[in-house]
Amino acid sequence: MMVAAGFKFVPANTPQRQAAFKNLPPHKFSREIKNGQVFYVYPDPTVCVCIYVGNASAYGTYRNNMFQKNLADEQQMTADMNAMNDWDWGPWGGYPYPGWYY
């Protein structure tokens, strides 16, 4: 999702990068300013031992994509829960409790 939003993948593959990598909070965005431009940095020590670097546009796109994904996930969860309302509870002794003994 990061690359699709416009972030660049930068591996921590040199001693200098590894040292700088350790100073960043893992799995959290950091806002950095370099030469008057704003960049967002996301270190991933778990999967790739790399950082993702993007500008404000990439960050905005990523946030929007995550919002859309979360919304779609919630809509799917709601649809799944609503589908259970039509399920036949009869063979199980009724719903919610008659015939159910714990």
Image (spheres, rainbow, N blue to C red):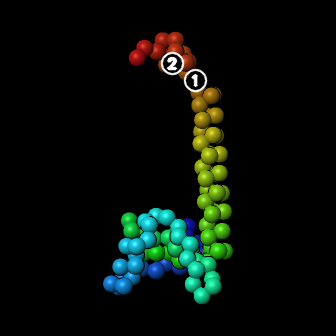
Which residue corresponds to the image point at 51% horizontal and 18% vertical from the top-left?
91
Residue 16: % across, % down: 36, 85
Vertical arrangement, residue 95 with respect to residue 70, above or below:
above
Which residue corresponds to the image point at 43% horizontal and 71% vertical from the top-left?
24
Label 2 residue SS: helix
C-alpha separation, residue under disc 1 versus residue under disc 2 = 7 Å
Q: Quadrant of the N terminus?
A: bottom right
Q: Residue 88 shows which numbered tag? A: 1
10 Å crowding of disc 2: few (<14), some (14-19), many (20+): few
Residue furthest toward the top? Answer: 98
Label 1 residue SS: loop
Residue furthest toward the left? Answer: 15
Residue furthest toward the bottom? Answer: 35
Q: Quadrant of the C terminus?
A: top left
Residue 44: % across, % down: 43, 68
Q: Residue 17 shows which numbered tag? A: none
Vertical arrangement, residue 91 with respect to residue 13, above or below:
above
Which residue corresponds to the image point at 62% horizontal and 28% vertical from the top-left?
85
Residue 25: % across, % down: 44, 66
Quarter-of-image position of residue 40: bottom right
Amino acid at circle 2: Pro
Q: Which residue is mark 2?
A: 91
- Residue 17 in view of the camera: yes
Instruction: Pick whichever, 18 or 78, lies toward us.
Output: 18
Amino acid at circle 1: Asp
Which residue corresponds to the image point at 59% horizontal and 39% vertical from the top-left?
80
Q: Are marks 1 and 2 in contact (CB under 8 Å)?
A: yes
Quarter-of-image position of residue 7: bottom right
Residue 43: % across, % down: 45, 70
